[in-house]
Image (tube, rainbow, N blue to C red):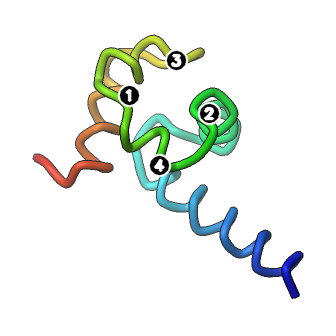
């Protein structure tokens, strides 16, 4: 049961990241590896997101806005 819960939890995390334009499966995986979890990504500032591997300014801004619910 824990195996399936883990897989489902991972799919939900990735799907939230994949809603952001410019974030595909590989970039989502890289971000999760870099920050350790979705909570780590949510806690990151725009500058920290921008400093992550493979992130551009537009994608970092879009990701920050998606995670913090701002327009």
At numbered mark 4, what does the secondary structure look like: helix, strand or loop? helix
**Image quarter hosting the N terminus:** bottom right
Q: Which badge, 3 or 1, is on the more N-terminal residue?
A: 3
**Numbered mark located on residue 52 in the image:** 3
Q: Which residue is farthest bottom?
A: 1
Work out whether mark 4 precedes mark 1 in sequence or the reverse, and give the earlier one: 4
Taking the spot 63% from the left edge, 27% from the top edge, the residue there is 34
Towards the viewer: 44 or 15: 44
Task: Mark 2 or mark 4: name the one nearer the start of the chain.
Answer: 2
| Marks 4,1: beta carbons within 8 A | no
Please identify the residue farthest to the top as the structure is shown: 51
Q: Is residue 33 left or right of residue 69?
A: right
- Gap in angstroms between the C-alphas marked 2 and 4: 16 Å
Disc marking residue 59: 1
Closer to viewer: mark 3 or mark 4: 4
Q: Nearer the viewer, residue 59 or 33?
A: 33
50 sits to left or right of 32: left
Q: Which residue is mark 2?
A: 27
How crowded is the residue under tag 2: few (<14 C-alpha within 10 Å), some, or many (20+)?
some
The answer to which image quadrant residue 65 occupies is top left
- The image position of residue 70, as x and y in percent, is 13, 48
């Amino acid at each position: 049961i824990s195996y399936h819960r883990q897989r489902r939890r991972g799919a939900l995390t990735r799907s939230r990241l994949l809603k952001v334009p410019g974030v595909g499966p590989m970039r989502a995986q890289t971000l999760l590896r870099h920050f350790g979890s979705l909570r780590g990504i949510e806690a990151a500032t725009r500058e920290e997101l921008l400093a992550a591997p493979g992130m551009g300014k537009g994608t970092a801004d879009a990701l920050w806005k998606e995670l913090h619910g701002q327009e």
